[in-house]
Image: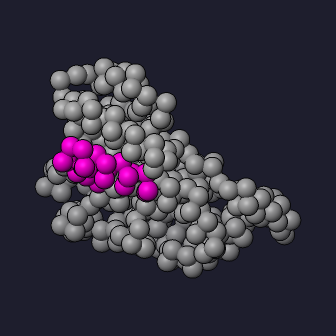
Amino acid sequence: MIDLTGPLRPWSARLAERFARCLAGGARTRSWWRPPAPRGEPELLDRLAELFGSPPERTVVTGGVRQFATSWAVRTGPAAVEAPTFADIPQILGAGLPVRRVPWRELTGGAAGPPGTIWLTSPFRNPDGRSLTAGETEAVGRLAGQGHTVVVNQVYRWFHAAGPAPAAPDGAWTVTSFAKMAGGGLRLGWAVAPRPDAVPRTLTSDGPPTAWQRACAGFLDEATLRALRADCVEPTTEARQAFAARACELTGRGVPGGGLSAVFTCPGSSEAEAVELLARQGLEVSPGSAFGCPAPSVRLAFSGTTAAQAVRAAETMARLRPGFTPTSFP
């Protein structure tokens, strides 16, 4: 069985050993038992600025995107959340805010609704790998200028091969984490506010433990990032590219988007039937409805496959043509 549900890749033993040493070092730092600094330990904020250009005066350290969303949900006002998207986000925000699921074309076309939170993922939205175009980025920036609080989830930024993540819309928040590079167990992320005074109190009390932040500050450097990319990002990128190339060769259709995932609609059958059919062919996939896809579909994630396995998956799906069509949702 080829697992295309998105399991995480393991670190190399050398990288895991280095992190263990940094953890031990963090527990030996002065007064590590005290609460962390409200926006993050100074050495970690400095490291995020050095490596990613995150201004310390506008940055707050978090336990990841879900933790950020949990703290954000105590705000007042409605939230317009992109559709499709990772299912946890509208559920978490919906615990405290009235949430509408809105396609990008409606958000950027003037259907954002009354001022409130607008939540988008770019680059490489899960599930279809779509990224904001230049025109969409400008349109979302205008929404921020009209009083909306725009949050752009950049958790898939690590798959942007051209260097740093693309610029966020003007006036937007950005939130990201190392989950898609280093695994969700690291539980380390950060958010960047559009202004220093925009950070609400609810985001300054739930950061990771002091010793953990200091350990991560010691762990993160250019060499570590290169090693994490080699262990966890590049094999995923290679697998998706191999799948897309073979699928195009066999069917004449490109696979849109990028990042770690892709979506295929399954006209003429239900999602449950499509998932079962692929399982019988040796492919384990996720139903598109788990991400709010507007049409019966399946999502493929390449974070747990080799390039050779991805090629076999493309060949299997091509044999089932025209039952599956690569898709990106507007």
Looking at the picture, how far across and down is residue 117, in whole percent? 33, 53
Q: Residue drawn 43% across and 28% down?
A: 282
Above or below 141: residue 203: above
Q: Is residue 245 magenta?
A: yes
Q: Residue drawn 18% across and 48% down?
A: 252
Looking at the picture, how far across and down is residue 316, in whole percent? 34, 34
Q: Which residues are magenta?
A: 237-257
Pick whichever, 90 or 5, lies toward us: 5
- Quadrant in the rendering for residue 98: top left
Q: Residue drawn 72% across and 70% down?
A: 218
Pick whichever, 63 or 318, lies toward us: 318
Above or below 71: residue 147: below
Pick whichever, 194 or 175, lies toward us: 175
- Which residue is farthest left? 109
Looking at the picture, how far across and down is residue 269, in whole percent? 22, 22
Pick whichever, 148 or 297, lies toward us: 297
Viewer can see residue 151:
no
Q: Is residue 3 magenta?
A: no
Viewer can see residue 145:
yes
- Image position of 168 (left or right of 64): left
- Image position of 254 (left or right of 47): left
Above or below 248: residue 40: below
Above or below 183: residue 55: below
Q: Residue drawn 22% across and 30% down?
A: 323
- Quadrant in the rendering for residue 193: bottom left
Looking at the picture, how far across and down is residue 34, in whole percent? 78, 61
